[in-house]
Amino acid sequence: MNASTEVVGTQLFDLRGRKAIVSGGAGELGLALVVALHACGAEVAILDASGETASTAGRIHDPHRPVHGLRADLADRTQAASVFDEAVRLMGGLDILVNSAGIQRRSPAMDFSEQDWDDVLAVNLSATFFLCQRAARVMVPQGRGKIINIASMTSFVGMKFISAYAASKAGVMQLTKALSNEWAADGVQVNAIAPGYFKTRMNAAYFEPANAELYRGITQRIPAARWGEPSDLQGALMFLASRASDYVSGVTLPVDGGFLGR
């Protein structure tokens, strides 16, 4: 590799001076995304319902690249709008939005409650749309911006007992395409990442001894022969958040160890 190639590679993924918001950034996958953005030079604001949001931000915070922790219930549109606006004010702008907030409810479809359905759609889909909308009101006038939504393998395939989650994540994929069609000409790229099976608390049931056979079956179905770690999302994020993806928009990128290709 010659010197000029090294410079081009470094510049493509350089996020110094960029301002990023990560919803759900105190969770396992969201935190990995916050760490990646911060490591590449971005100032980051975490929006999360967790009581550990501020302490999580404090552990990563650097005086030269601040990390702000703002707690809010993102299903509450008033709270979500308020913390979004506060994040933009604190950072003095916005270049990157990552929508990684998500919840899960498991139940046979015939027994799925209205409340569980509403809760899942409110966080996974509605909050994603309204945060994208607010981000676009900043990004479109400035002529640039990156929006990265977190979809799922269930954006592509159906699975039992998670009907609301599957519907919400299929919606995220189509929403990503629709917003890309509206905003790509204004310099705002809207893309999504679709994680496969990851080792997170959301999937904790799979690791219980009673589900050992199911866990083995899923693992055998993954060509990479392992479940994902949160850090496995970082490369895809850095591509979609940086100049490297300036001509990529409307894409949902699977990060699944090859699961969907089998």
Image (spheres, rainbow, N blue to C red):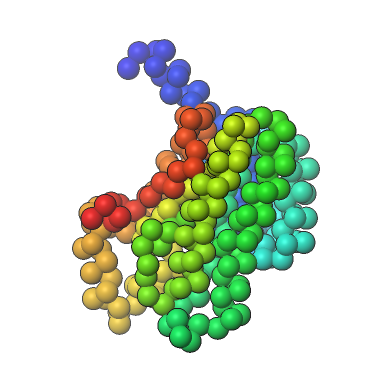
Residue 152 visible, this angle: yes
Residue 227 % position (x, y): 32, 59
Residue 30 visible, this angle: no
Res. 152 image quadrant: bottom left
Which residue does the image show at 75% across and 55% down from the upper left?
A: 81
| Vertical comparison of 6 with 115: above or below | above
Res. 217 image quadrant: bottom left
| Vertical comparison of 8 with 233: above or below | above
Front one among 243 and 208: 243
Which residue does the image show at 39% across and 17% down from the upper left?
A: 5
Count the marks: how many?
Answer: 0
Residue 8 % position (x, y): 45, 19
Which residue does the image show at 41% across and 12% down from the upper left?
A: 4
Front one among 97 and 42: 97
Front one among 242 and 119: 119
Residue 235 % position (x, y): 42, 41
Q: Quadrant of the N terminus?
A: top left
| Vertical comparison of 22 with 7: above or below | below
Which residue does the image show at 44% across and 47% down from the upper left?
A: 252
